[in-house]
Amino acid sequence: MSSESTAPDTIVLIHGFWVTPRSWEHWITRYEQRGFRVITPAYPGYEVEVEALNADPSPIEAATIPGIVEHLESVVRDLDSPPILMGHSAGGAFTQILLDHGFGAAGVALNSAPTEGVPVVPLSQIKATFPVLGNPANRHKAVGYTHEQWHYAFTNTFTEEESKALYERYHIPASGSILFESALANLQPGHQGTWVDYHNDRRAPLLFIAGTEDHLMPPKVQWSNAKHYKSDTITEVVEFSGKSHLLPAQQGWEEIADYALAWAVRHATARVAGATTPA
């Protein structure tokens, strides 16, 4: 990558809820083979293996949005140059927040959770999140999915065998506290943890990638989130047919990974050449 001084040489992959950085394992290898440095930061306390978090979910219960954002920013701040940021699910919301705060050369949000102010709540999303949000007692707990719930929310287009294998390999509980906070963000006064400035003209280019069959964060959520941006900087949406929520592991993930990388490199390089990198 050194031959193109304006092109980013580092990619930061940000995982979502109910999974850990392990969910990016295929993308790490693919991007490293293309000469990129790949960093997959875990949320604070999530640095242990999936099996350990399932055995002791207390780090998940202790997680907060400000704590996660602060940690991710510290990782990116220590890099020599702005990286490409890619986030899946909740990681997509964190990608948007980091971009708004002036980090990153370009961002890609895959099946992203919405930032504050996006009111669209499709029925499939209600069903997918009901195991957590349907019980107020979950607000201060780490709440896992059963395999049946995981299959509906994450892997509805996978075979039963594939879905079970990925459930065993990737699944961990999610923070009920954060999920309730995010769900109620639009009803609370003032800015909440997932707020971004939709008019920020200094934000790096942002691409939303939507899987057409995603139950948890359907395309309607991606389009609505993107339309909230009123800034002059680039904001685009692309849909991939037949894809469910767990895009990083679904058959055909290579096409999505390559598209995301090509888009990010192209727009980041053009942006740096135009001398519009945020402070």
Image (cartoon, rainbow, N blue to C red):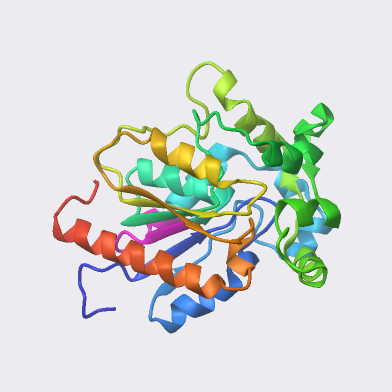
* Residue at x 43%, y 45% (from the top left corner): 96
* Residue at x 80%, y 49% (from the top left corner): 144
Which segment did they paint magenta?
75-86
Q: Quadrant of the N terminus?
A: bottom left
> Most extreme residue toward the top, as rendered?
189
Q: Quadrant of residue 97?
A: top left
* Residue at x 29%, y 48% (from the top left corner): 234
- Taking depth in this image into account, of 235 and 37 the one nearest to the observer is 235
* Residue at x 77%, y 69% (from the top left corner): 159
> Most extreme residue toward the front, as rendered?
241
For this view, does 132 lie left or right of residue 10? Answer: right
45 in the magenta segment: no
Q: Is residue 151 above or below residue 39?
A: above
Q: Position of residue 25 (x, y in %)?
A: 60, 73
For this view, does 183 lie left or right of residue 164? Answer: left
For this view, does 112 lie left or right of residue 85? Answer: right
- Taking depth in this image into account, of 159 and 225 the one nearest to the observer is 159
Q: Is residue 195 above or below residue 86?
A: above
> Most extreme residue toward the bottom, as rendered?
33
